Image (tube, helix red, strand yellow):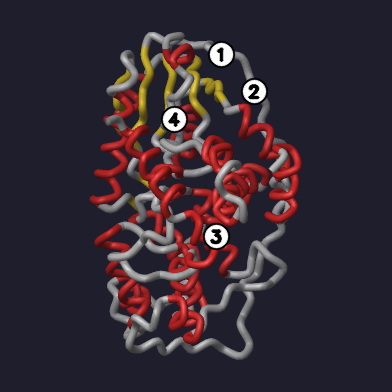
Amino acid sequence: MNIFEKANDLLDNFIFNHLHSYHQLRNYDYGIENRTNVSQISKYTSHRILYEYDIIEKLKKYDKRKKYTDEILWRIYWKGYLENYKSIWFEYIHFKEKSNNSNSISSAINGKTGIDCFDTWIEELRENNYLHNHSRMWFASIWIFTLGHPWQLGARLFMKHLLDGDASSNTLSWRWVAGMHTNKKPYLASKENIDKYSNNRFRDTPISMSSEINIIKNSQHQSNKLPVQRSFPNSNFLLMFDNDLNIMNRSKLFNSYSKVYILYNDFINNEFVLSEKASQFKRGLIDKISKLIPNSEVLKSKDIGTYLRGQILVDVIYPGVGHNLDLINKYAYQNQINLNYIYRDDDLMYWNYAKSGFYKFKNSYYKLNNI
């Protein structure tokens, strides 16, 4: 069984056995021993082992309430929104922590806050490299509004450990909790909400929220032009990254090149690197995909120069705004290499509708696809 069959089996098991109760139970975090109320496919969707648009097409027949369809649409929406407002990403990656609360941040990162639920989630994040979506929201809210730490450091922490770490979903979700994506409406965790949806699993949940929440100042971000598809192939080499590993129906594309390089990048923000478990998982996916592409080779980020030196033009499967795009753009600029990005037609189409709120995007997608 290859990685695509394994991922689709996981998805199918959820659809046929648990989707019927998803709309009622999806917000409950029962702990690591019971995850049947959620699909747990995010580690595959974030790397596009499972392709978002294919999942939604499959769900047309089964997801009558559209709750799970909406969750997949959020991923497409976040990706498109960041493509429309790239300055959000640049602002995030250039953030520098200037406060003197390093001891408090260290306590939070090491699960020593005394807030039972938060400390439990830190341990789960480190050991299992996964958190339930509702717990991610609670975690981020406590991080920002109870502990008073910068959201950017929390976002980096998630990217370091999560197997499903995705630049757009992660960055914009943290901004959403902080009240920066919506109209100054932060997501505020409460003891009552956590107790209810965690089945009272936690002993002490001393979450203190100020009566006057300080809304984080949000810079104005102007939308930028979206890319357009260019012709290909234009070079002998094709470069692809770990966050778009779906090779279905692309054999003709791969056969057009003498070599396909799959780049493994463990840097998520300058000196910030993936945890060992997250790194091993990502590298494992890349190795599995490489075996399915006859003319491919895995390339470490530090070895780009050795393999691409002297090239004038390189075709690249577009990795989306994020750390991979930063890496290849920087290298190309320093070595005067022209990059020809290859986009997915689905992305280019639907990114056009991700310029404002999610519900406007969702309604447009539903209308276009008769959902």
| Residue nearer the viewer, 336 or 295 | 295
Residue assigned mark 3 = 173
10 Å crowding of disc 1: few (<14), some (14-19), many (20+): some
**Residue 262 position in % (x across, y down):** 36, 27
Residue assigned mark 4 = 246
Give the residue at x 43% y 83%.
195
Disc 3 on helix, strand or loop? helix
Q: Does the rendering let one see residue 269?
A: no
Q: Which of the two discs, 3 and 4, sits closer to the camera?
A: 4
Give the residue at x 59% y 44%.
76
Marks 3 and 4, the one that precedes in the sequence: 3
On screen, residue 115 above or below 224: below
| Residue nearer the viewer, 188 or 63 | 63
10 Å crowding of disc 2: few (<14), some (14-19), many (20+): few
Q: Which of the two discs, 1 and 4, sits closer to the camera?
A: 4
Residue assigned mark 2 = 229
Amino acid type, callout 4: Asn
Q: In which quarter of the image is the N terminus?
A: top left
Q: Does the rendering let one see residue 240?
A: yes
Residue assigned mark 1 = 232
Query: How far apart are the alpha carbons under marks 1 and 3?
Result: 34 Å
**Residue 217 position in % (x across, y down):** 65, 70
Disc 1 on helix, strand or loop? loop
Q: In which quarter of the image is residue 258?
A: top left
Amino acid type, callout 3: Ser
Give the residue at x 45% y 38%.
50
| Residue nearer the viewer, 244 or 324 | 244
User: Are circles 2 and 1 on residues that touch, CB within 8 Å?
Assistant: no
